[in-house]
Image: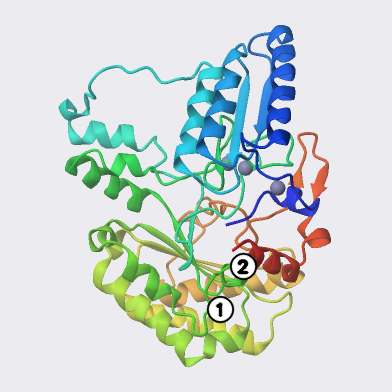
Amino acid sequence: MFACHPTCRTYGLHDKPLGSVARQDRTVLQEWQVILQILANNIKPRSLRLSFICDTRDLQTARGIVESLGCLPLLRDCSIRLGQIPDWSSSALARSMSLQLTGKTPQNLGHPTTLHLPDEVLEHILSFTELVAPFQLEWCPVRGLSPFDCCKTCTDSLLGCCCSFYHAAYATGCTCWRLPLPLFLVSKRMHRIATSIFYSKNTFFIATIHRNCVMWSPEKPLSAPTITTQFFNRLPSNALPHLRSITVGFLDFWPQSAFTHLAITDWRQGIDIMAKSLDLSKFTLSLQIDVPRYPEDECLQACRSIVHSLIHLGRIKRLFVYLSGQSSRYYKTKGKQFETILEKTVLGDDYDAVLHGKYDVNFPLWYDGYSREGPIFQADGRKVWDPKEHGNSDYDYEDYLNFM
Ligand SMILES: [Zn+2]
Ligand SMILES: [Zn+2]
Ligand SMILES: [Zn+2]
């Protein structure tokens, strides 16, 4: 997990977390009370967006400082961080105060009434919840489905992240997607319906070779890419028949990697699992293959060997092949043709991927499939942080190890 927001790391050391015993800490608390009174007496209700970052040493301090915020009038937006490391109790404190201060505290409307709804109605309602993510859900063996970086809408300052996934924090403006676990835990019936929606309405992205995934892994980099089979083996077995859409990304692609015995074996075993357990007639498979700007024969041969393995899969509903490098001249002429040839090899000459919605269904990834720390833009569009300038990968990795 990141120590803190990338912009914050770039600027170096932080203050120590606040406690309530040391004299310095008590002075800080007194000063804060004065500032708070000025704010409370002068701000107009529902106009201030407050980002409050106070990493605390213990829960008691966290509780005290959160309660002090209660004197403020209603705010427009509120994010509160009480510690760098995720912590359920502090996050819950931050959450209840943020909601209270923005007038969003949920009303208790008595007993849930879902029991009386027929399955189809409940399914329809649940398909509008976070069970259906707005992105392709990228899966990696180390982190599972979790997003890797701050949504960058959690605070206005960009200096400190207040996403509850990464810190003991809560932000009313956070737009990070999270697996809505509570929905799966309501009852057996809800679990069954939630499982079917979650696996059938999302597209899962499996990054077979992923520079960042390996780099951020607390374990040694994976020597053998066995990621496709791991994905299927780790899913609950009752989930497999629900799967409707998977993208397999051959990222950081270099021809040798696709030719290694282990990589090909993993891919073929993955295909065997799909053939055995998925409902192929409803299944869409997308392949995203990174190729150099002007791929040589060896690379094209590797693409063929990846796609040709699918001939034994059986008739799937749709196959989309995307070769990267859309901006290159090669792609505009030969690249697209090559994609079409590959698709037709598997699904026959009559198959037309474009008619089947090839360019309609290319959902964005959470970020870009490579880096969770994309450039950071201010609201006016000015770029305030660029990972290429400030955070070369060696530095980040060391930083990460120190934090662990
Ligand atoms: Zn920081
Ligand atoms: Zn954040
Ligand atoms: Zn967020």
Q: Is residue 404 left or right of residue 144?
A: right
**Which residue type does callout 2 highlight?**
Asn
What percent of the width, then of the height, locates residue 24? 73, 35
Secondary structure category for the residue under label 1: loop
Secondary structure category for the residue under label 2: helix
Q: Is residue 189 left or right of residue 214?
A: left
Q: Is residue 364 left or right of residue 327?
A: left
Instruction: Decide if ligand 2 comes within 8 Å of the CB at mark 2.
Output: no
> For residue 210, which quarter of the picture?
bottom right
- Which dot marks residue 212? 2
Q: Which residue is mark 1?
A: 221
What percent of the width, then of the height, locates residue 58? 54, 40
Could you tell me which quadrant the C terminus lies in? bottom right
Q: Nearer the viewer, residue 383 or 122?
A: 383
Category of crowding for the residue at label 1, using alpha-carbon neighbours closer than 10 angstroms: few (below 14), some (14–19), many (at least 20): few
Tell me if I can see residue 386 in this picture. yes
Quote the CA–CA distance across marks 2 and 1.
10 Å
Q: Residue at x 76, y 58 (%)?
A: 387
- Please tell me whether residue 12 is drawn above or below residue 258 in the rendered image: above
- Please tell me whether residue 35 is drawn above or below residue 288 in the rendered image: above
**Which residue type does callout 1 highlight?**
Pro
Q: Residue at x 24, y 31 (%)?
A: 121
Q: Which numbered disc, 2 or 1, marks the residue that appears first in the sequence?
A: 2
What percent of the width, then of the height, locates residue 361? 50, 52
Category of crowding for the residue at label 2, using alpha-carbon neighbours closer than 10 angstroms: few (below 14), some (14–19), many (at least 20): some
